[in-house]
Image (tube, rainbow, N blue to C red):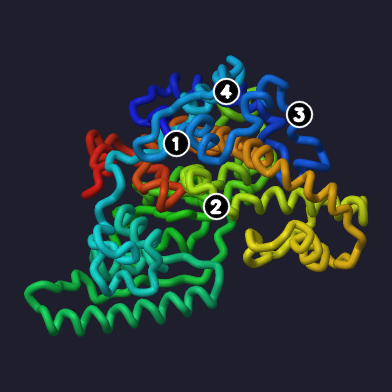
Amino acid sequence: MPGVSARGLSHEERRQLAVNLTRVLSLYRSILDAYIIEFFTDNLWGTLPCSWQEALDGLNPPQLATLLLGMPGEGEVVRYRSVWPLTLLALKSTAYALAFARTPGFQNPSEFPENPSQSSRLPAPFRKHVRPKKQHEIRRLGEGHLSRFMSLGLGLKVKSIEGDQRLVERAQHLDQELLQALKKEEKRNPQVVHIPSRCSPHHVVRWVDPRTLCDELLLPLENSPQGEARLLLTGLHACGDLSVALLRHFSCCPEVVALASVGCCYMKLSDPGGYPLSQWVAALPGYELSYRLREGACHALEEYAERLQKAGPGLRTHCYRAALETVIRRAQPKLRRPGVQGIPRVHELKIEEYVQRGLQRVGLDPQLPLNLAALQAHQAQENRVVAFFSLALLLAPLVETLILLDRLLYLQEQGFHSELLPIFSPELSPRNLVLVATKRPLGQAFSVLETEDS
């Protein structure tokens, strides 16, 4: 998906981008604020302009991926079956133009040439217990899994902060398992395998409060002369306010000289406190981002476009859940958007079977009389549900862009140097933009991070 590169934007250009984003999000807030499970109860299709309805109605999933999301299949020629209204084309062009570019400097990482589960660029012992997505991420960013790689793979002195005692114990177990595997490998191949450090990560159980500084986070692992400790803070998909805490520690603590942070779970940001951070964004009209907008920013656009291209039966899940919501509202009007635990193999169920199981999951009588004709009429609108969800997904990167841009502006207001770089493949890792910040100019160092071999 095309977009604007954060690299090379001046301070004024970043501020103007924030202005443009808040204006656009204000225009289309009703689409982003909508819950797809209320498609029928709130008549979401009817909220779209009639000309948009005519253009989108009847488009199948692959056509939505190609024409709306701008992600055609390989070798596919883009052809519109009708003339789209200028307002819809403007929405599409604006969504492309204002979102941060998510495509890294390399195409289709070559680290999985033969086995899609094993990165060829990560030594075999470091791949154990690590999913391909995480293999790609830790190899690129250089976290338990990254911290293990940084200490035992790169020889760095690493402190890992985790709030859950059980996860820390698990990480320590995996550290020792890996260390033993590396020692055995070194004995077998002493000329090939070299362990730069025998020191495992130093794990600390501590909950990091985003509103205060964590002394433990800043304590060096070894005694350093006064004022000479130099720390790099890094967080690989640091959830919600944890990313904000890293930014504040970087800003307030002289011993922290650099930051590399990939955020996620934007809906868990404190409000206020987690967003906005910059004075500039906080002063803009329409800067507010509701929980729903921030949640939508966490969706995987590229992965959904791939699902649309394959047009699998799993796409009907949103339609089924929206139909279930109508039955729930009739039975219990005050019960709105209840959580429905995952119903397995939805695509193999008839809509009435899904509704019965869903009613049971939310504590209602599964034998309630159902209006089968109404349910089937809802099912006939499956492509409309998919089209509306695709519209929201098209706009979602603008929300993520505003959140990350706010962080860049916050650091610039503090006088620091920061860039935002797409360093993961978005197909493998949807939250693929890393915020890199330093307290002194680094010249071309940022450019190196954008290459596959960095």
- Residue drawn at (68%, 41%), measured in percent from left and top? 385
Amino acid on which the number 3 mark rests in the picture: Thr
Marks 3/1: CA distance?
25 Å
Residue 235: x, y in percent?
A: 43, 55
Q: Which of marks 3 and 2 is nearer the N terminus?
A: 3
Q: Position of residue 214 (x, y in %)?
A: 51, 58
Horizontal side of 324 relative to 164 (left or right) equals right
Q: In the rendered image, which quarter contains the N terminus?
A: top left
Q: Which amino acid does label 1 sit on?
A: Met
Residue under circle 3?
47
- Residue drawn at (57%, 29%) of the image: 279
Q: Which residue lies furthest to the top in this view?
A: 86
Mark 4 to mark 3 CA distance (whole Å): 16 Å
Q: Mark 1 points at which residue?
A: 71
Residue on which disc 2 sits: 312
Residue 91: mark in rendering? 4
Residue 444 vertical position relative to residue 53 in the rendered view, above or below: below
- What whole-number distance in Å separates the C-alpha atoms at marks 3 and 2? 27 Å
Disc 1 crowd rating (10 Å Cα; few below 14, some 14-19, many 20+) is many
Mark 3 surroundings: few (<14), some (14-19) or many (≥20) residues within 10 A: few
Residue 143 coordinates in the image, percent (x, y) = 39, 62
Q: Distance between the residues labelled 4 and 1?
A: 16 Å
The answer to whether residue 184 of the structure is visible from this angle is yes
Whole-percent x, y for residue 70 in the image: 47, 32
CB contact under 8 Å: marks 1 and 2: no
Q: Between tags 4 and 1, which lies in front?
A: 1
Q: What residue type is labelled 2?
A: Gly
Q: Do the residues labelled 4 and 3 touch (CB within 8 Å)?
A: no
The answer to whether 8 appears left or right of 280 in the picture is: left
Q: 202 and 229: which one is in front? A: 202
Name the one closer to the observer, 324 or 369: 369
